Amino acid sequence: MIVLEILQGTAKERLHRVLGNGGTITIGRSPASSVEITDFHLSGDHAQISQVGEHYVFRDLRSTNGSAIERDGRRVPVDAAARWELALVDGDILLLGNPGNPVRVAVRIGDEADDDLGDRLIASRSILDLPAVVDQLDRDPVDALRVYKALQPLGARREPADAIEACVVATFELLPRATHVAILLRSETDKDRFALALARSKQPEMRSPGPTVDPVRASRAVLRRVLTDRAAVLTANAQEVLSSESIMGGSLMSVLAVPLWRGDDIIGLIQADNRHASGMFSETDLETALLLASQASLAIDNATLVQRLRAAEERARGENVYLKRKEQKIKFVNIIGESPAMKAVLSQLDRVIDTRATVCIEGETGTGKELIAAAIHHQSQRADKMFVAQNCAALPENLLESELFGHKRGAFTSADSDKKGLFEIADGGTLFLDEMGEMPLTLQAKLLRVLQEGTIRPVGATSEKQVDVRIICATNRDLAAEVEKQRFRQDLYYRLMVFPIKLPPLRERREDIPLLGAHFLKRYAEEYRVELPGFSQDALDALQSYNWPGNIRELENEIQRLVIQAESGHWIESTDLSPRLRKVEGTVARIAPKQGTLKEMMDQVERWLISEALRDHGNNKTKTAVTLGITREGLHKKLAKFGV
């Protein structure tokens, strides 16, 4: 037998029971469909379910919006891109039509007898009968004391696992006829699924440490009766009623099941089994179990709430540490540079700070791209919101997606709680994406959607969130070349290049090296508590003559090393510099021209300087001319003159 229950969708009948007879069930908007669902995004003949041997096969009839099956928390597509049909298993959820808001249909497969308790039901007690049970208990002080002592430990448990264990112990104490006890809890991610939380047997050798071993499983019929009637139920001769697939272990003489509830919601149930005919449960046991369940529900719910609060506190503490570390006010005055190249950059920043334009900062590694991005944010109207930075090359694709967009609990194996993404944290502020050229193509598509629509979808979520985030990105790659090589999306390239800013390398702003050197010398001298007068002229000449392939970051590291090894009160000399910097000490000797007239000696020096500049720029004549302060035509004349 197969049972289809419409969980989400427009249909006159919510429940459809079909006996297995080798036939076919049709699903769609057509009135002729076996299961008529009138949601507009379904096709007239959307799908069908056919019995093939002992299996039921779901087939999408090439519908417009496709179908999928939710199984064990995973979405399995059934469409042209994947497959047109798939065998169903008990517990599947059909997802029909619009992927963003599909029609949801629960599938139950089992024996016809398993669908109804029939005349095997002995007694039932609604949770509304609880006050009457309490009143009756008040008239029996001895029994009241017994129940009180059994339930007292429940209130002291602060971990969900401990609370569940205490509930099992209390069940054995209050129901001495029970030989096996199991607790099932409703899934947080799938409200239609109940999972075994703990199962225990009175015999120590049969005890199970957790949900991996399942010595007793709740019957579908018992579970549905508890959920439908919101009542505790008692059944007899269970081995004649339920198939071996419904209850493992067999030989059950009676089953007592009682719901756990939170307000109007059933959050689980306690099932106690008796496997000895001589000790079958009574209606008094059923009433005692109802009282037990009320306290067990409260204990499990409180422990779960404490666990969530603890986890939320840890997340908040981690987010606060991150945000405080990033919340550093940076002004343009902190950007050091008096060279024409840096003045041009600062002029560009003044124009863009209070716009919504996306900024792309280009420059070699170590040129200070994040410093510039932070300065734009903290001088803008978004300064009272967050500035959040993420290096796109620092994480693998799946972790980067979760870091940027967040995820829902259960989205993947280690996702044990909801997490806010950086887009959500930076809402109203600025998100800086460093090493933009390293972002995988699949994430580039999702970033493009954020730029176009202003919405994000956390991993595992079914709905989108609106965010207001300004994007500033940085790269040391030539993104135009990456587009030509099809390693970067062209549409995203144009979205990011609204306002590009090119940061000059340190070798193109040598006049700023003394200012930067003095700044870092002062910072690290204060940090390491030494007094240093400054740099000698020879040391400054050596610093300015070096090409600094690592740019400002390399300069900062060099000066930090100098301060660590320097003696307080002494000037920094050229001999203190690293060997790679001291190579420039022989520059004058290498330049020294042969004896001749002044013009001949000047020509030799000029020829050497032009050759070195060409080498520094990889024979790029345009950049060489800019560095030397002459025109490209003037450089060509000199190259012809000197035969270079």
Image (tube, helix red, strand yellow):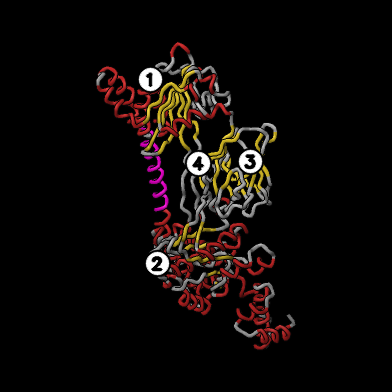
Q: Which residue is mark 3?
A: 25
Label 3 or label 2, whichever comes before in sequence order: 3
**Marks 3 and 1, Cα distance to the nearest angstrom?**
42 Å
Q: Which residue is mark 4?
A: 190
As measured in the structure, the alpha-carbon distance from the residue carrying label 4 to the one carrying label 1 is 33 Å
Q: Which residue type does callout 2 highlight?
A: Ala
Give the amino acid type for the residue marked by disc 3 in the picture.
Ile
Of callouts 3 and 1, the N-terminal one: 3
Q: Residues within 10 Å of mark 2 (few under 14, many from 20)?
A: some
The earlier-in-sequence mark between 2 and 1 is 1
Q: Quadrant of residue 169?
A: top left
**CA neighbours of label 3 inside 10 A, class few (<14), some (14 to 19), many (20+):** some
Find disc 2 in the rendering and name its residue: 383
Residue 601 appears in the rendering: no
Asked which secondary structure carries label 4, the reply is loop
Q: Is residue 43 left or right of residue 566?
A: right
Pair 4/3: label in front: 3
Quadrant position of the N terminus in the picture = top right
Q: Mark 3 or mark 1: which is in front?
A: 3
What SS does tag 2 mark?
loop
* 68 left or right, relative to 321: right
**Magenta residues, as a range?**
299-320
